[in-house]
Image (cartoon, rainbow, N blue to C red):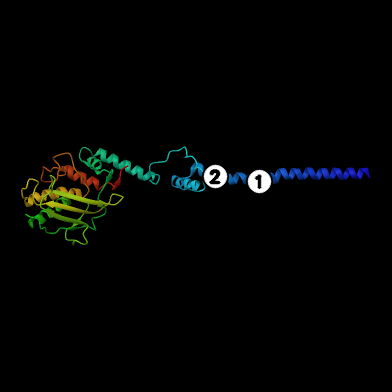
Amino acid sequence: MIERRLSVLVAGLIVFLVFAMLWNGFVRPSHRSARIESAAPSSTLVTIIPDSATARRDTTARQAGQSPPPPTAAPAPADPGTSYMVLLARSETRRRIRASAGYTYLNEVVAESGDSMLHRWDNRIFTPVRVFLGPGTAANFQTSFLDAVREAFERWQQAGVPVRFRLDADSVSAEVHFAWKVQFEMKRTGQTDLTWDQDGHLVNGVVTLATFDPGGRPLAADDVRVVALHEIGHLIGLDHSSDSADVMFANTKVRDLSPRDIASALLLYQLSPGTLR
């Protein structure tokens, strides 16, 4: 009888030990694994979440009444949406502009832009820019002024600038409008106002030409041609040059395009428009 009871106790002890071993080997590890898996996404979000999602994560924490998580150790780039290839292309553009300093003034153009951007028309050889070139009612206006402006456009085209202008557009459909006034209040005889998109592509413009110089002297047709040469330089995307030998000098002294005017325009149209930052 005693032996039977011992056998039962031994058997029960064996069953208990086996059950304990099974519990430690299978049940408890699965619970530990579950806790690790649930913690992994939280850890991942803190360390490698993109900057674009960081703001959303902080907002979610504030809405939940919690403090936002600390910023990651790695500093965020100035423009996280800009690809490496784009940054490399901008760097190459800056290099080419610096290298051209001896024969162009594009470095001055960028400095004058105020937004470190190159502005120009894009793909406008087969689809010319539509220009409204109509007569004016300002005193001293002459029909020969229209031919003078056409000659100025033709001169830039002869220089090889890869953009074309169609000068017979009507006022409604035109992308560029020419206007005439008697005189400017400031010491100038022309003004060009341009609009461009966020990528630096020119989209429209207004060119205003005077019929009298700042001293009150009436302008002749050839004077208007020179003024138009300067303003069309702005129209294609150039800014002022610091050299009085260039037609793009602020107070134009010459009466034709210089080699630097032409080289600057040609290089501008070899480069992509937009920011150089």
- Mark 2 surroundings within 10 Å by alpha-carbon count, few (fewer than 14), some (14 through 19), many (20 or more): few
- Disc 1 is placed on an element classified as helix
Residue at 92% across / 43% down in the picture? Answer: 3
Residue at 29% across / 40% down in the picture? Answer: 94
Report the residue marked by disc 2: 42
Direction from residue 185 to residue 82 in the image, left or right: right
Q: Position of residue 172 (x, y in %)?
A: 21, 62
Mark yes or no: residue 161 visible.
no
Q: Which image quadrant for residue 16?
A: top right
Do the numbered discs 2 and 1 sit on residues whose CB atoms are within 8 Å? Answer: no
Q: Nearer the viewer, residue 98 or 43?
A: 43
Residue at 18% across / 45% down in the picture? Answer: 262
Q: Residue furthest right?
A: 1
Amino acid type indicated by mark 2:
Ser
Mark yes or no: residue 46 visible.
yes
Q: Position of residue 156 (x, y in %)?
A: 16, 50
Direction from residue 115 to residue 39 in the image, left or right: right
Quadrant in the picture for the N terminus: top right
Amino acid type indicated by mark 1:
His
- Disc 2 is placed on an element classified as helix
Q: Position of residue 134 (x, y in %)?
A: 14, 59
Quadrant in the picture for the C terminus: top left
Direction from residue 50 to residue 117 in the image, left or right: left
Tally of numbered tags: 2
Q: Which label number is shown at residue 215?
A: none
- Mark 1 surroundings within 10 Å by alpha-carbon count, few (fewer than 14), some (14 through 19), many (20 or more): few
State the CA–CA distance, disc 2 to disc 1: 18 Å
Report the residue marked by disc 1: 31
Q: Answer with mark 2 or mark 1, whichever residue precedes in sequence.
A: 1
Q: Residue furthest front?
A: 65
Q: Which image quadrant for residue 203?
A: bottom left
Direction from residue 13 to residue 133 in the image, left or right: left
